[in-house]
Amino acid sequence: MRGRPQSALTEINRIDSERLRTFLYAITYHTLGREKESDAALRGGIAKYEPIDSYLIALIYAFRNQSDEAFAWLNRAMPRIMRG
C-alpha cells in the first residue's frame, strides 16, 4: 500500500487471484477505517478459503491487532504448515 491505501483499492482490482483480492480488501479497508467492509471481506474470505488459508487469515487478524483471533487461526493452520 506504500502509505496510500486509497490507491491500493484500484491496484487490488488488477490482481488476477480472487482469493488474494479478497484478503487484500480486508487489509486495505481496515487501513482506511472502513471496518464494516473489512469485516465483510474477511468473512467472505473465511467462508470461501478457510480450509486452505488459515495462515493468511491469521496474518490478517494480526494486522488488525486482533491477537486472540490471530492465534486461534494460527493454531488451525499449524497442522497444515507442519505437513508442508
Image (tube, rainbow, N blue to C red):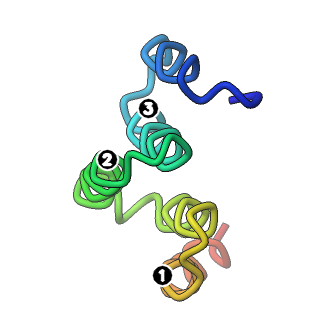
- In the rendered structure, which amino acid carries the disc numbered 1? Glu
User: Which of 43/5 is in front?
Assistant: 5
Say whether disc 3 or disc 1 marks the residue closer to the N-terminus. Answer: 3
Q: Is residue 19 left or right of residue 58?
A: left
Give the residue at x 46% y 48%. Answer: 33
Residues at circles 2 and 1 in contact by the CB criterion of under 8 Å: no
Secondary structure of residue under mark 1: helix
Give the residue at x 48% y 50%. Answer: 30
Secondary structure of residue under mark 3: helix
Please give the residue where the numbered disc 3 appears in the rendered image: 21
Please give the residue where the numbered disc 2 appears in the rendered image: 41
Secondary structure of residue under mark 2: helix
User: Which of 31/67 is in front?
Assistant: 31
Say whether disc 2 or disc 1 marks the residue closer to the N-terminus. Answer: 2
Kindly identify which numbered label has been placed on residue 69. 1
Q: CA distance from mark 3 to mark 1?
A: 21 Å
* Residue 82 in the image: above or below residue 21: below
Q: CA distance from mark 2 to mark 1?
A: 16 Å
Residue 17 x %, y %: 44, 26
For this orientation, the residue located farthest to the right is 2
Quarter the N terminus occupies: top right
- In the rendered structure, which amino acid carries the disc numbered 2? Ala
How packed mark 3 is, by other alpha carbons closer than 10 Å (few <14, some 14-19, many 20 or more), is: some
Residue 64 x %, y %: 56, 64
- In the rendered structure, which amino acid carries the disc numbered 3? Arg
* Residue 71 in the image: above or below residue 52: below
Viewer-nearest of discs 3 and 2? 2
User: Which of 67/81 is in front?
Assistant: 67
